[in-house]
Amino acid sequence: MTIRDVAAYSGVSVSTVSRVLNDHPDVSKDVRERVLNAVKDLHYVPNTSARDLVKTAGDSIGVVVRGAENPFFAPVLSAIEQAVEDAGYTLSIRQIKAGEDELAAAARLSRAKKLKGLILLGGRFDYTKEDVAPIDIPFVCCTFTNDFGTVESDAYSSVSIDDREEARRAVRYLTECGHRRIAILMDSASDRSISELRYKGYLDALAEAGIEPDPDLLIESVEFNMAGAYEKAGRFAASGKQFTALFAIADTFAIAAMKAFHDKGLRIPEDCSVLSIDGINMSLYTIPTLTALVQPKEELGREAVKILTDVLAGGAHRHVRLQTALREGGTVRKIG
Amino acid sequence: MTIRDVAAYSGVSVSTVSRVLNDHPDVSKDVRERVLNAVKDLHYVPNTSARDLVKTAGDSIGVVVRGAENPFFAPVLSAIEQAVEDAGYTLSIRQIKAGEDELAAAARLSRAKKLKGLILLGGRFDYTKEDVAPIDIPFVCCTFTNDFGTVESDAYSSVSIDDREEARRAVRYLTECGHRRIAILMDSASDRSISELRYKGYLDALAEAGIEPDPDLLIESVEFNMAGAYEKAGRFAASGKQFTALFAIADTFAIAAMKAFHDKGLRIPEDCSVLSIDGINMSLYTIPTLTALVQPKEELGREAVKILTDVLAGGAHRHVRLQTALREGGTVRKIG
DNA sequence: AACGTTTCTGGGAACGTTTCCAGGACCACC
DNA sequence: GGTGGTCCTGGAAACGTTCCCAGAAACGTT
């Protein structure tokens, strides 16, 4: 079932069928109709590979996403999808697994699919010029953060919140509420994950408030999942260490910790306040509602696409930082 | 950057490069090495479209999924991904939006990508033979349910739980715990959604226990999302209607309802028990832990792939029903 | 010494589209 | 009746691969 069958069936040439299918103006009313009927009769659908192959100047942009199961990414991805469509491009999404190198995956994808541009969603954040050299099309890192000011490359764009600064704001909110014994729940920062920056922001805020950081209040989960966070937070709560607040580097971590604390007999927020960064949908339904610095998820996605299309139109790469909004739930208590 | 460039660079023919790239045996040691070096030097990656185009007997199977943002699908999808890879096929995933017809999407995808087989994830369940006629490759519906016994087509396969029966079991568990005023929270069943079957199971269980169904205890949310469920459940709780238990047709609904009840001053499980079907990861972290009939999500995915590969190998279509497992959390209380 | 066999290599057709180019038909105008 | 234009249509090249087929070289085997 190819375009040739349709042509034969409707008694016109292959070119004409193609024109009808692609809405070219130069085709007469009745021929168009005949062809469309043939298409319907034969259940014909154009072959994507052949189409993509000849359209060497493909209008697709790609997204490489690490861990799409992360509920944070879903709305970002939707926004990207929508924006890409609105901009007249098509989207090609590639998920990568924990171990894979996202830059290598991006390079492969771009060549294999002849992409116009790329968006990288989640992951590391410290690309050098030569890291990105294999990628020969414009790309923008979305929800990535640089250690602001140090590595601001002009080889690619980025859009994200300023993780360090937002973490500082978050923790400052806690200190302003009177908390001084503030624990932090994060995943191991060893591989320059986002935790590293949010941890720095945590330290910044403590310093600002004149609080000596206490290594005892650092809760590290090896894996980035709720089970790990639950287990570490529970162990921490049982250890008897004194603290009045927890700063979780992600909503999922906060939710797991709230459960763990509850299981150990701590009440939230009476015995312990909880605050996090992200603001996923689910955290609206915890009891009490999670207080969080909410990332502008849709805007992150839209902005990524906007930057990319700008760059594709000849613009220069740029780095955009968006701000979170404080959502006051019921997990933070003023004390002292 | 095409295979021709690589051929020129390494001084061999196009055919030879292709052979090296596809691990054909008939190529000498040093030529192979020279070609591989060229590939590396030039950052060459084969074009997928061209490759797919010529490989007319593509080894891909496709997945059409409606609403991948649904946290229930994530583990099913992962399992499918893994199983498909293990079976030596490649995967092509297509998401569809709320309004789209999944059969049309499936038909399009199968032709556009020349697929070997298809898996449909989520959605409706009442396909007739002529509905599926446009799809000319084997397909299996995963997490779909037929109204068991009525429409058991041999034109396609399916794997899912028996929604009506499992809902009956769920509600029976509640009646066995002494509940007689049992509300049900579902989305509008108007379009033969999964709600319809779970609602029937609910009625079955009531009948079995000699309880007259009360239309006042039917809580219907128009949209299938947490916000809608939260709003309806809250309104219901405020209405003053007497009830001791809620059966939610999905974990997400249950979580939203728990929040709504809490906001209206109801305690769970003291004032109201809550039970649902699905068992998503997040429901392990509600307070108390949600009691639910947990679907075998990974097994559903694996089984779907197994059935499909069997059919592709010449087997007959079949319909498999898996069972849920009761996970006793803390949201159901024995009374009376 | 002639002949098969094996091992390697290159040429070129095919996959199913899009699109450039050329040309036929029709019309209007001087 | 030629000229130029618009409207429509078909032929054929091109996209980047894979793979069949043919053939060259090297090596036994009779």
Image (cartoon, coloured by chain):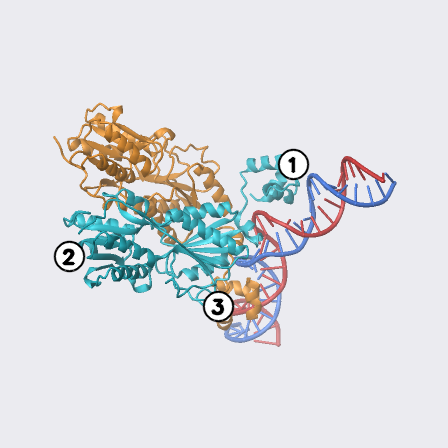
Chain colours: A cyan, B orange, C red, D blue
Q: Residue at x 65, y 36 (%)?
A: A31
Q: Secondary structure at mark 3?
A: helix
User: What subunit carries mark 2?
Assistant: A
**Residue B207 falls in which quadrant of the image?**
top left
Q: In terms of depth relative to the viewer, which is nearer, B224 or B176? A: B224
Relative vertical location of residue A289 with respect to residue A108 in this rendering, above or below: above
User: What subunit carries mark 1?
Assistant: A
Residue marked by disc 2: A242
* Residues at discs 3 and 2 both on one chain: no
**Which is more N-terminal, label 2 or label 1?**
1
Relative vertical location of residue A323 with respect to residue B2 in this rendering, above or below: above
User: What subunit carries mark 3?
Assistant: B
Residue A258: x %, y % from top left: 21, 49
Q: Secondary structure at mark 1?
A: helix
Residue B326: x %, y % from top left: 21, 40
- Distance of mark 3 from mark 1, alpha carbons? 50 Å
Amino acid under label 1?
A: Val
Q: Going by the image, does B321 lie left or right of A78? A: left
Residue B135 visible, this orientation: no
Residue at the extreme left of the image, as rendered: B336
Per the rendering, the mark at residue A31 is 1
- Say whether marks 3 and 1 touch (CB < 8 Å): no
Give the number of the mark in front: 1 or 2. 2
Give the number of the mark in front: 3 or 2. 2
Residue A277 visible, this orientation: yes
Residue marked by disc 3: B40
Q: In terms of depth relative to the viewer, which is nearer, B248 or B127? A: B248
